[in-house]
Amino acid sequence: MSWRGEEMIVNRSAAYARRLGRGKRARRTGASMEGSLASWVNSTVSQREAERQVERTGERVLDLYHNDAMSHGVIESLLVEAVGIGLTPQPSPKSDWLGQDAGWESEFQAAALRAWEEHGLDCRHWCDAQRRLDYYGLQGLAYLNWKWLGIGVFQVIAKKRPMAPLSTCLLPIDPFRLVTPSDLTNKEIYDGIEIDKDGEPVKVWLRKPGEIMTRPISANCESFDVWDEKTGLPRILLVTDVRNICEYRQDSILGPMISEIKHSNDLAEAAVVGAMIRNLYTMFVNDFGQGKVSKDTPWNKRVVETEKGTILVGSGKEKPTFFQHDAAPSRYSEMFGAIIDRLGMATGRGAENVMRKFQASYSASKANMEKADQINEFEHRTLNSQFSQPFWSWIQYESALRGRLPVKSLKHFLTNLYAYTHCEHLPQPMRQIDREKQAKADALELSNNTTTLRTIYGKRGKNWRDETRQRAIEAKHFQDLEAEFSVNLSEVSESVFEEQEEEKEDVRDNEK
């Protein structure tokens, strides 16, 4: 076979592969953007077209976030629920795995937390390379980019600062810089992320700062390796939860909601127009005077327009008819409620959660909040595994390099990096309507060994060792005061508690 024949076979195989690949990518600016089922006819598109559409969708999503109140509220409420005050790390090294005792575990936890707090929370040298956000703020930014644009991108770099204990920093990268170079179509690059034959991300491609071309060539792009060869940790953190094997960038959460949000805006404008119309009047005045108006008088001489309404002048023999404006618009609240129900399904948290108005019974509202918390736990897993845990591991690695952690050796640390850096990132607790019941539930779980002080304090963003030490300091202070003044402060506190219980019983009796 000649070389030309071999070239034809290769081209046919490539074209066949491209045709197979088209069926795995759907339109990202389809029915939700155009509002028509006819757009489903072109639901299968090519890889390049899918990447263009995801950028177009991202631009529309950012526009909605900045200019639409409902979209802004949805995103902000998701951020407050899923991240809130931040996911607090609680180091829990595998001491049995490493052959260490409980004393070493306590020492390691204290050293790891100290390194993290000095590096991530000290305002002199936050772990953000732009020096704008602390550790918790970076978690919020990662979540926002993930929900806004389908992916959050961060680069781990070393940046020395005066008096800074560590040099490891995170540099946030605008997801819009992810791009597939136009001259590298023969490589497996999806949404700006190059993968190997098994689908593992190996490089990210970013358009250079100032590059204005939509599809630049590779010379106008920058590429960075995803993984660090020495530690095995990711140098590029990709926060996403995509499940399509042909894409690496998830769709924005606002993408499927665009049609509902547009309908909501149309309904709101119709309601405003309806309210304006209802505040206007139409008055019919009979002319019983000189007979200047008759049935033959033109309408342009019988209508008087004022700022607040319209006056119709009729003759003495004409019967007046008045117009009612309360029918415009009709059933606004019912249609708006249907839109809110659809938005509740789209976020997975229910309509009451979207509206922030819990009007159902206590048990129904509680069930709704628990269902929403299930979604939050699922998102915590993604955020922790792709952002919080890798960056925590980088902080512990540099701390081990600087001798700030009690490790056997650096080689032993790298070999058992997972056991050393194992950490739980606890979210903020659910806000309780009845805090007394929650306190009793915590005490009951502590008594039957179904929870720990570390978990309870960790969900509040506090260190259980510091809090229990402070409690011991206060108890010792009370003992010193009792010895100095010959009083029993515990009896005073008990009497106050008994008085509160008596007041509650009186209230119950009065209600009966």
Image (spheres, grey):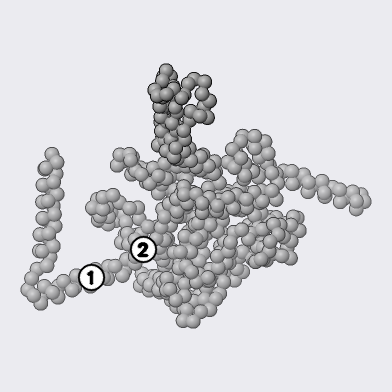
Return the residue at label 1. 472
Count residues near mark 1 (Cα–Cα under 10 Å), then give few for <14, some for 14-19, many for 20+.
few
Residue at the (82%, 49%) spot, across then down: 11
Between 96 and 239, the one lying in front of the other is 239
Image quadrant where residue 223 sits: bottom right
Q: What amino acid does circle 1 point to?
A: Ala
Residue at the (59%, 38%) spot, across then down: 35
Residue 229: percent from the left, percent from the top? Answer: 61, 69
The CA distance from mark 1 to mark 2 is: 20 Å
Q: Which mark is residue 461?
A: 2
Between 336 and 89, the one lying in front of the other is 336
- The relative height of residue 388 versus residue 293 in the rendered view (above or below) is below
Outermost residue on the right side: it is 2
Residue 172: percent from the left, percent from the top? Answer: 55, 65
Q: Identify the image quadrant of the C terminus.
A: top left
- The relative height of residue 279 versus residue 250 in the rendered view (above or below) is above
Q: Is residue 432 shown left or right of residue 351?
A: left
Q: Secondary structure at mark 2?
A: loop
Residue 92 makes an appearance in the image: no
Residue 59: percent from the left, percent from the top? Answer: 59, 53
Outermost residue on the bottom side: it is 162
Residue at the (27%, 71%) spot, across then down: 469
Outermost residue on the left side: it is 486
For marks 1 and 2 on the same chain, the one whose residue lies earlier in the sequence: 2
Image quadrant where residue 111 sits: bottom left
Q: What amino acid does circle 2 point to?
A: Gly
- The relative height of residue 498 versus residue 491 in the rendered view (above or below) is above
Between 236 and 500, the one lying in front of the other is 500
